[in-house]
Each structure stands twice: as structure tokens, then as C-alpha cells.
Amino acid sequence: MEKLVAITACPTGIAHTIMAAEALRRVAAMKGHDLRVETQGSEGVKTPLSDDDIAAAGAVILAADIQVDESRFEGKPVTRVSTARAIRDTEAVLDAAVAAASGSAHATSGSAHATSGSAHATSGSAHAANGSARAAAPVASAPVASAPAPAAGAAAPELAASPAGKGLLVAVTACPTGIAHTFMAAEALTRAARAAGYEIRVETQGSVGAKNALTAEEIQKADAVIVGADTHVALERFAGKRLLQTSVGEALKKADQVVTRALSLPEPEVAPDLGHRVAQAKAQLKEKQSGPYKHLLTGVSFMLPLVVAGGLIIALSFVFGIEAFKEQGTLPAALMQIGGQGAFTLMVPVLAGYIAYSIADRPGLTPGLVGGLLASQLNAGFLGGIVAGFLGGYVARWIRDTVRLPANLEGLKPVLVIPLLSTLVVGLLMIYVIGKPVSAIMTGLTDFLRGMGGTNAVALGALLGAMMAIDMGGPVNKAAYTFSVGLLASSTFTPMAATMAAGMVPPLGLALATVIARNRFTAQEREAGKAAAVLGAAFITEGAIPFAAQDPVRVIPAAVLGSALTGALSMGLGCGLRAPHGGVFVLAIPNAVSPLGVYLLSIVAGTVVTALALMVLKRPLAQPAAPPPARP
């Protein structure tokens, strides 16, 4: 055990000063060292070091971004680092100080031995005295140590690998600011896991985005999952794993207990039913998403609640009359204001904001939201929002990865530098370059769809319907769905009606087929057909995926045929839908769908056609041979 003293100081003396002191104290305690820390800042000196503390210390750590008086440490080995290094690379800093202290101790021991030898020499010998002085000299000129800095672009130093054969843990740490506690908790969990003999991968969700993002393979292999966070962390990817949720403070201060608790959780019981298989299929589809497609779907997923809420609230305003909202001060007017001027106004900004968020994480949110709002104001619609989202995300990510600041100013990047520069770039491009051309395209597309009728409407409906069934939740399905949802902001409702009706048909048709053609399905498939009926009624097309995976050659063509028919009928009959989700459960809301009767007819027609096609394409299962009659 070494006795050490330290000083932490930054220009403000608030965040980095305190966080560096906390990190040094915690790691020193874990490594068994005795450390006294003095903090210096705008409010003066806190927990000052005494003369006895300094005299007893084997080495000094100066974690400072400002000038610190070192005169009282004369003769002591000093390790000088920035506060940022002390926070993020605490162990290396302490190891350097301990090494310096050990070197100083050896020098002091050598000096004492030389002095003892001079005392036994002839009294008054000037030569012996001079030799003693020369031997003691290294103490006076103590070495100055510096913690080795990692190479540019290199990752933080890794600890020694844990004993093999005990398994893997994965974790996510996040705090509201995402600067210090996020990384300190990750470091604490890493040490605690490896002390227990486990490897660990920790994803940090900080102020500049997620670092060391966990892969699906790592999550699949993990024995348990730890989420140490004081902010929202999406948990869907950890379904079926032992999961411990705690605060980032507990993960930092009681990391060993957190690891023990996570490993002691019981294994979750996952029933191999259709719902579970659908969830697995959706997770696999999501894992395959990458690049622009993934970013676009992220934006759409965050926009959907606004579209659903806004569309249904607008539909409720029509209960009192189609034009009742025009009378100010009435309930219909209030409902229209909430749905149309509230929720629908936020649709495009949220779409753009979360596309940018998917690309650049939190730094992309501001330019994306502002760009999306400008797209709405410039009448560029959802196409302008998509352009603004991608532009904001890639600009923010480029600034994040390219701009380099001194360590003590690094905290300004996520709150000042990136939002300011990226929002300026996106805003100016939207106003002067992108807005007007995209607005013209959006206006032309809207006018074309509104004026479309007859054969063209039927063809578009059939195309959208077939796209919804061809890959049942995959890229083609999502392309049709995104196109239809985006048009809701322009008050174009017929494509959305066709898309939802067609998306309901595959699982509904399969459910019907398991009832009317029982001899073509196994007992397990017939049982799964009941769950598929519920999923189809709720507009969850993925409910058909387990059937399609087992027999794609017959199931997919049958589903495409029925969905194309439903889409064609819906568009040809002029059905409109104001909400982008909900299935049959949204049909009970007045004016959400119009006309309702023929819309239901189109869904029934597609369901029946899919079931009949399956009867034709699938052969009856071979019946087990009857047992031979028993002999008398």
C-alpha cells in the first residue's frame, strides 16, 4: 500500500475538479492505496492537505488544468496530468504515481545506506562527508513522473484479461450529462466483473453519443445484462436475458454488489409461442437494418405516436360535423388545434430530428429538429424532413469526429460547438438551397395523388399492398409504409388506408386457412393460427413470418395475392385512413376511416383470397399409418 496525495483543479473548479477527485479516491481505495485529495477552484481550497499528509506521502498527483503552486512538494515525485486524464484513465495515472513513489523509496534507501557508511568512516573526514552528500542528492532532485498518454485515436488502456471460462457480461451506463459518471461507472463495472472472473463489454451513452455499442452477438452470448442509468435506455434488445436495472451512482459506488446481483438473477422463462417467434423475427429484421434505411426507420418510429394521436384527435373533431372546427371556442375547434396544429406540426421536425439522432446520436438532435421545422415552414413536407434529418445527422457527426479541442474544453463540444455549427449549416442550406426544390416536388406529388382515380388508383393500391406482404416487415414493407405515413402530413389519406388494410391480410389469411384447411397444417401451426389472427387484427404483419419461414414458396405468393387485392380495392373505392396504426381497433373511432363498410369488405376479400390460395398451393399433410389390428 502506498500513501499518496493529490490536487485536482480546473478553471471553474466545479465539475472536472470534483469528478477527478472522486475518480482518484475510488480507484485508489479499490487498489488498496491511501490517498488524500485537495480540490482547488473558484470557491477556494477544499479538503486542504496538511504538512503531515505531504510528509508521509510517497508521491504527488497533480490533476490540474490551471497553474498550481508546487513549492510544498519539493523533494517528492510528482505525476502531472489533466483532469480529463484523471477522470477517464484513472488507473494509469495512479500506477504512474505508485511507480514514481517506489523509485523514490529506492533512492532514499540508497542515500540512507551511504550516510551510514560515512558515519563509520574516520571522524572529520571531508571526503566521507562529501560522499554522503552526493549519495543523498537523488532525494533532493526527486524524479517528476508523467502518466503515459495513449496514442492518438487509441482506446483507453485495457485491464488484464479475466480468468477464462467464466462467461460474459454486458452493460450500459448513462447519466443525464453523459460526461463523467457515465464513464466512471463503466470503469467500476469493468473492474468488478473482472475481479469476479468475467469478461464484460460496457456501452456508454454519453454527451457525444453511444460508445462501444453492444452488438447482437455480444448480447446473445451474455450471461446477464446490467443497465446503470439515470436516463432512459431502450431495453428491447435485451429481451430474454437476465437484466438488472440500477442507477449510475450505484453502479459506480457498489459495482461489486451490482455484478453479484445481476449474476444471481434467475433465468427468464421464455415460452416458444408465436408471439415469441414473431419478436425474434422482428429483432432479426432490425439487426439487418443498416445505413440510411436504419436511420429513416428510426425517425419514422419516433414520429408514429404523433401521427396516431394527431390523426385520431382530428377524426374526433369531425364527430360534431365535418366543418364544426371552424367555429372558434368550441370543442371541435380545440380538438383540431390539438391534433392539427399541435401533433401534426411536430411530425416532420421529430422525423428529421430522430433521423439525425440515429446517425450522430445526441449531437444530431438539434440540427435535425431545426431542419425539420424549417422543412414544415417551407412546405417541403416529409420529403424535406427526410433531407433535413440526413443532412443534420451527417454534418453533426462530421463535426463531432473532426473538430478537436483542448482536453479542458472538450465538454463544450456537445453543448455549444456541435449544436451551433451544425444548426447553422443545416438551416442555411434548407432556406437557400434545399427548401424550394423539395417543396415543388412535394406539391407535385400531392396533387398527383389527390387527382388520381380509376385504373391509376387501383394500380397504386395493388403495388402498395403487394409491397406490404412481400417481406412482411422488411425493407420493402417499411418503404411502402413510410411513404403512406409521410403523406398524412399533406392530408392525403387513401394510400395509408390501403397500406394498413393490406398489412393486416397475411396473418389474417393464414389464421383463416388453419381453420378451413386444417389438414394442411400441423397441430402447432393450427394453434399458432389463433395468435396470428389477433396479430393481424392489430396490424402486425410480422405475425405471418413464422409461417413464411417454414414454407416461403407457398405462403409468400398467397399473402402477396391477397394483400394486392385488398390494396387495390381500398384505393379504388376511395377509402381514407387518418391514423397510421391500430388495425381493426381504430375503426371504432368515428371518422377515422371513411367509408367504413367498403374498407372492411376489402380486408375480408383479401383475407379470403389468401386462405383459398393457401388451400390450393399447400398439399395435405401425410396422415400417419393406422396401427395394424390386434390379433385375437
Image (tube, grey):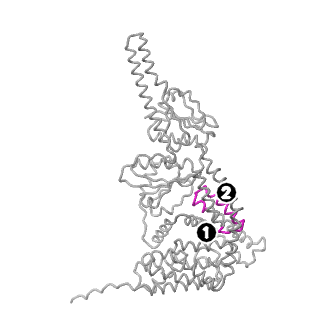
State the CA–CA distance, disc 1 to disc 2: 28 Å
**Quick check: 498 above or below 94?**
below
Query: Residue extending furthest top?
Result: 124
The disc placed on residue 208 is none
Residue drawn at x 45%, y 38% is 95
User: What residue lies at 40% left-to-right and 16% top-to-bottom?
Assistant: 118
Q: Is residue 158 above or below residue 271?
A: above
Residue 456 located within the stretch drawn in magenta:
no
Residue type marked 1: Leu
Looking at the rendered image, the quarter that the N terminus falls into is: top left
Q: Is residue 35 left or right of residue 632?
A: right
> Label 1, on which residue?
304
Q: Quadrant of the C terminus?
A: bottom left
Compared with residue 527, is residue 194 higher up or lower down, i.e. above or below?
A: above
Instruction: Find residue 233 and report its horizontal and vertical position in percent.
Output: 54, 58
According to the picture, the residue beneath numbered tag 2 turns out to be 425
> Which mark is first along the chain, 2 or 1?
1
Would you say 370 lies left or right of 97 here? Answer: right
Q: Position of residue 262 (x, y in %)?
A: 44, 55
Residue numbers of the magenta segment:
354-383
Q: Main secondary structure of the magenta part?
A: helix
| Residue lying at the far bottom of the rendered structure | 632
| Residue drawn 56% across the image and 40% down it | 83
**Quadrant of the rendered image containing residue 128:** top left
> What's the residue type where badge 2 is placed?
Val
